[in-house]
Image (cartoon, rainbow, N blue to C red):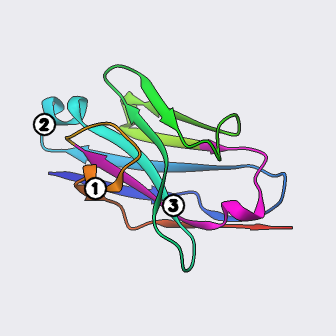
């Protein structure tokens, strides 16, 4: 069992930055260290899409092409927190952002994730 709580969303003008946080907890250190963590987003009227998939144990990550070079994922193991630094934001980045955890393949496919946070809203104005 994994619990996820996102925070850090808000409103910003195009070109600005935001940092999202995802506080996570798991039943055991074994579970926490072996789950893939991901950030997804869903804009109004659109499907939920993967932003970045991150395997904490190996430190590897996969980014969606739309955010490469602008978004960076990181973690603070001491705080059990995952971060998504978002720079050079664009209006098309406007969406609800979700943190997710999964025990299957670490890819940008929402079907591979078992646990989801409640989401945090990001609004980017032009």
Mark 1 or mark 3: whose residue is earlier in sequence: 3
In contact (CB < 8 Å): disc 1 and disc 2: no
Q: Is residue 87 above or below residue 97?
A: above
Residue identified by numbered label 3: 41
- Of tags 2 and 3, the one toward the viewer is 3
- Of tags 1 and 2, the one toward the viewer is 1
Q: Quadrant of the C terminus?
A: bottom right
Asked whether, in this view, residue 63 is left or right of residue 87, the answer is left
Name the image quarter holding residue 72: top right
Farthest top residue? 58
Mark 2 or mark 3: whose residue is earlier in sequence: 2
Helix, strand or loop for disc 1:
helix
Mark pair 1, 3: CA separation: 14 Å
Residue span colored magenta: 85-102
The residue positioned 19% from the left and 44% from the top of the image is 26
**Place of residue 81 in the rendered image (x, y in percent of width and height, measured from the top left):** 41, 40
Give neighbour class at mark 2: few <14, some 14-19, many 20+ (Cα, 10 Å): few
Residue identified by numbered label 2: 28
């Amino acid at each position: 069992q994994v619990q996820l709580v996102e925070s850090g969303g808000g409103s910003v003008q195009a070109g600005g930055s935001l940092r999202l946080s995802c506080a996570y907890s798991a039943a055991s250190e074994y579970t926490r260290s072996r789950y893939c963590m991901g950030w997804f987003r869903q804009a109004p009227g659109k499907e939920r899409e993967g932003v970045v998939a991150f395997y904490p144990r190996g430190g590897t990550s996969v980014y969606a092409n739309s955010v490469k070079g602008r978004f960076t994922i990181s973690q603070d193991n001491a705080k059990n927190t995952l971060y998504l630094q978002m720079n050079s934001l664009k209006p098309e980045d406007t969406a609800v952002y979700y943190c997710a955890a999964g025990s299957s393949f670490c890819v940008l496919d929402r079907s591979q994730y078992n646990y989801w946070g409640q989401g945090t809203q990001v609004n980017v104005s032009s």
